[in-house]
Image (cartoon, rainbow, N blue to C red):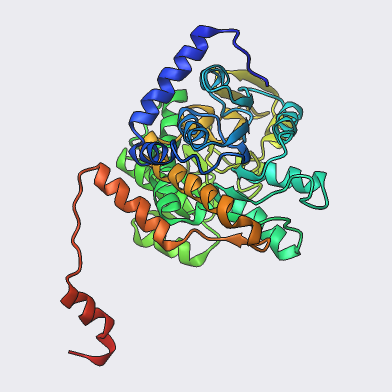
Amino acid sequence: MKYRVKDVTLANAGKQRIDWAESHMPVLYALKKKYEISKPLKGFKLTGCLHVTKETGVLIRTLKAAGAELSWCGCNPLSTQDDVAASLANDEEIAIFASRGVSTKEYYEDIHSSMKILPNVTIDDGADLTVEIHNESSSNDKYDLFGGTEETTTGVIRLRALEKSGKLMYPVIAVNDAETKHDFDNVYGTGQSALDGIIRSTNVMVAGKNVVVAGYGHVGKGISRRAAGLGANVIVTEIDPIAALKAKLDGYAVTSMDDASSRGDIFITTTGCKDVINYKHILNMQDGTILANAGHFNVEIAVSELEKNSINKQPINEHVMLYKSQQNKKIYLIGEGRLVNLAAAEGHPSEVMDMSFANQFLAVLKLSKEGKSWKPNVYTVDKSQDQEIAMAKLTSMNVKIDVLTPEQQKYLSGFSEGT
């Protein structure tokens, strides 16, 4: 266990933050209360590789209350909230292998330390844990794996590639693909928290700035909306003509990165692909340009090229590094090009993670019951689970919706027959 009870003050602060998050996550809390007596996960060993935030702390509490034995690591070197990790180790007695600011070597050591529990179920965000398990063993016999879950788009892409190659060793539920995850977490969560990270770390005024958003998927849509709401002139870059057309009709300027590179004041990448902003683009940028990434891995901005070709660099604060080019141009990079909403802020609001982590919990519950009989494929979340979580969230917000009458149900079911 990386965290021991060394700093009680730190652990206490983390506990208060988890308590705060739990009070804003009513759906997950209700699941905790529902299953803490029956303990359906008793006897199951779970390894989680998720950002160690206060919201993840609530998920861990819920899984533990349901009886699971847990081991946990971070899925990003800069996303761990150390006080939360200390509290989970101290108050919840969870094996936590995560701390903020680890090296790449330490990051993978933490993943392998968390794997020593020999999990029955994995909970992943970005698929690093899943890939490491596959790299370590040619079969799942060692782990007695029932299945896994995946939290984010990038991870699902990697797992579908494993599935296509025939190398996926155990079934995985793509939690990211649930509507109550990607339509809310990715859009509203990242939309708000990415701008939060940029504002916290720079305190620049967004209004009047040209904000270039690379990619118009769910994350790009959310960031574009929030930036526009703050008064920015939003420019979207895309490779998909349909997504580009949506961005255009949503009221944003759409162009190539080659063109946008000279126009933007703030750049935010959201694609999950590498070299979306390459060094040629950086050379074309204005003096004082700010670069941020909201994709899972730190590959979207050519950070290594920026490092190699700059004549000088100096930290502006904990989160922002200034790079100076040979032409004396200044480029500001936030959070080493890692996830800006977690590197420079606190990640998604608790209210939106409530639905994402309710999906995670229910997916784990399903795998514990059925996963052993499933083929090693990537599975989607059942529509009924999506509906259940959405209804629970609406109820917690005191929102009422209509219900079809028997006559309406009959009418719709026989619609093809006419009136």
Q: Residue at x 77, y 49 (%)?
A: 134
Q: Quadrant of the N terminus?
A: top right
Left or right position of 100 against 233: right
Left or right position of 243 against 396: right
Q: Locate residue 351, reporting x and y percent.
A: 35, 38
Q: Locate residue 411, reporting x and y percent.
A: 21, 81
Front-most of 151 and 28? 28
The image quarter containing residue 106 is top right
The image quarter containing residue 124 is top right
Q: Locate residue 33, reporting x and y percent.
A: 38, 36
Give the answer, above or below, for where 115 lies relative to 365.
above
Give the answer, above or below, for where 256 lies relative to 193.
below
Q: Residue at x 69, y 61 (%)?
A: 163
Front-most of 21 and 64? 64
Q: Is residue 248 visible?
A: yes
Give the answer, above or below, for where 344 lies relative to 213.
above
The image quarter containing residue 120 is top right
Q: Residue at x 48, y 41 (%)?
A: 264
Front-most of 394 and 107? 394
Left or right position of 24 against 178: left
Q: Is residue 332 visible?
A: no
Q: Residue at x 72, y 39 (%)?
A: 118
